Amino acid sequence: MDPQAFLRELESLSLPASSFNHKAHLFAAWSYRRRYPAREAAARCAHTLSRFAMANGAAEKYHHTLTLSILTLLYDRMANDASLASDWEAFLTACADIRQDARHVVLNHYSEERLDDEASRKAFVEPDRQPLPLLCLSH
């Protein structure tokens, strides 16, 4: 699907919830980053994902710290390899670990206790294990 058309469907809440699997989450992250600087892309993507979850009766599934951590890791990879912004398949290959088990990758940065804390679900909480590559958000 065309990234802009996908984002229009997602933002207008016309995308069926049944179509929004983990790969679609990654496509949203990739599509936003192609269109906006990393910091703005992360903010827009997180807002849209939260709104989409609420609109589909799944607000409890949205986890703000997990979302922003994954976006930061994805955007760091894109910052280190500019070709990933133009090649969806290359992006998927470069992010295979996040595609397979994003939570496991994020647990390199967070303890389970911190990530599972209710406060981290509602607002971004800094990692307690290893810093996130936040420099990518300055682009």
Image (cartoon, helix red, strand yellow):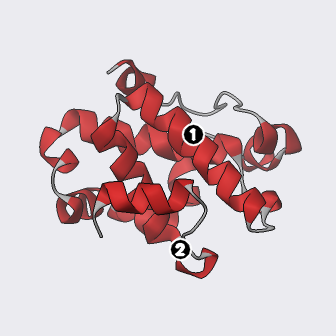
Instruction: Indicate the secondary structure of the residue bearing disc 1.
Output: helix
Residue furthest bottom as drawn:
18
Amino acid under label 2? Answer: Asn
- Identify the residue position indicated by label 2 in the image: 21
Q: Which of marks 1 and 2 is nearer the N terminus?
A: 2
Direction from residue 9 to residue 85 in the image, left or right:
left
Answer whether labels 1 and 2 touch (C-beta < 8 Å).
no
Position of residue 33 measured from the top left corner of the image (x, y, whole percent): 34, 41
- Residue at (66% x, 58% y) in the render: 52
- Identify the residue position indicated by label 1 in the image: 68
Position of residue 55 measured from the top left corner of the image (x, y, whole percent): 74, 61
Direction from residue 21 to residue 4 in the image, left or right:
left
Q: Residues within 10 Å of mark 1 (few under 14, many from 20)?
A: some
Amino acid under label 1? Answer: Leu
Residue furthest right as drawn:
118
Name above or below for residue 93 compared with residue 116: below
Kindly report the distance in space between the C-alpha atoms of the residues bearing marks 1 and 2.
Answer: 17 Å
Image quadrant in which you'd find residue 8: bottom left
Look at the image and tell me whether residue 132 can be seen: yes
Position of residue 18 measured from the top left corner of the image (x, y, whole percent): 60, 81
- Position of the N terminus, as image quadrant, is bottom left
- Residue at (36% x, 39% y) in the render: 75
Q: How crowded is mark 2: few (under 14 residues within 10 Å), some or many (20 or more)?
A: few
- Residue at (34% x, 28% y) in the render: 37
Name above or below for residue 62 compared with residue 38: below
Residue furthest left as drawn:
83
Instruction: Indicate the secondary structure of the residue bearing disc 2.
Output: loop
Name above or below for residue 68 compared with residue 57: above
Image quadrant in which you'd find residue 130: top right
